């Protein structure tokens, strides 16, 4: 019986061709920012096992990019929350924010810097 095994290079080329077709069919290239954010998040989580500060920086950048509008809305609505919420809830929110700044200052700073940079870009300004 003749063997029909393909060589490594042929198999690799076929796999790459299949992946390219899937990427084109599913229009994954239109979702580049989402893919970059997910890759950075995964990389940040992996790096955090070895160096927490560098992992926090990568995760902070992803948080700043992804949740910029929600972060701004949170801080805009914070005064209303303080007025209608009780003292206990307000102190807990403040405690969580202080804890994050103490525990992961690099991540918080990275998220804020990313948020500010994104606010300076006119096409993606979350402040408008």
Image (spheres, grey):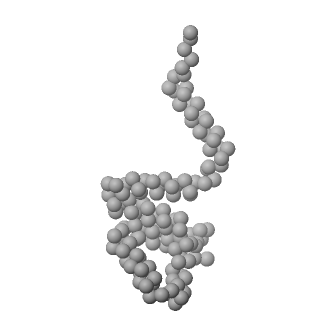
Q: Is residue 13 visible?
A: yes
The quadrant of the picture occupied by the N terminus is top right
Name the residue furthest right: 25
Name the residue furthest left: 50
Name the residue furthest bottom: 83
Q: Is residue 96 above or below residue 110?
A: below
Question: Which residue is at 45% across, 54% downward?
Answer: 42
* Horizontal arrangement in the rendering, residue 44 relative to residue 15 (left or right): left
Q: Position of residue 43 (x, y in %)?
A: 43, 53
Question: Which residue is at 56% across, 57% downward?
Answer: 33
Disc tally is 0
Q: Is residue 13 above or below residue 126?
A: above
Q: Position of residue 45 (x, y in %)?
A: 41, 56
Q: Position of residue 125 (x, y in %)?
A: 58, 72
* Horizontal arrangement in the rendering, residue 49 relative to residue 75 (left or right): left
Image quadrant in which you'd find residue 19: top right
Question: Which residue is at 46% across, 82% downward?
Answer: 89
Closest to the observer, 90 or 125: 90
Q: Is residue 119 visible?
A: no
* Horizontal arrangement in the rendering, residue 19 relative to residue 97 (left or right): right
Q: Position of residue 122 (x, y in %)?
A: 59, 71
The quadrant of the picture occupied by the C terminus is bottom right
Q: Is residue 99 above or below residue 35?
A: below
Closest to the observer, 76 or 127: 76
């Amino acid at each position: 019986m003749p063997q029909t095994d393909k060589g490594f290079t042929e198999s690799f080329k076929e796999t790459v061709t299949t992946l390219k077709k899937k990427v084109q069919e599913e229009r994954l290239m239109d979702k580049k920012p989402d893919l970059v954010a997910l890759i950075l998040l995964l990389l940040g989580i992996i790096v955090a096992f070895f160096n927490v500060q560098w992992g926090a920086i990568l995760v902070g950048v992803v948080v700043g990019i992804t949740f910029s509008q929600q972060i701004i809305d949170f801080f805009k609505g914070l005064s209303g929350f303080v007025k209608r919420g009780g003292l206990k809830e307000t102190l807990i929110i403040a405690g969580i924010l202080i804890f994050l700044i103490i525990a992961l200052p690099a991540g918080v700073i990275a998220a804020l810097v990313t948020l500010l940079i994104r606010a300076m870009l006119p096409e993606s300004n979350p402040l408008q």
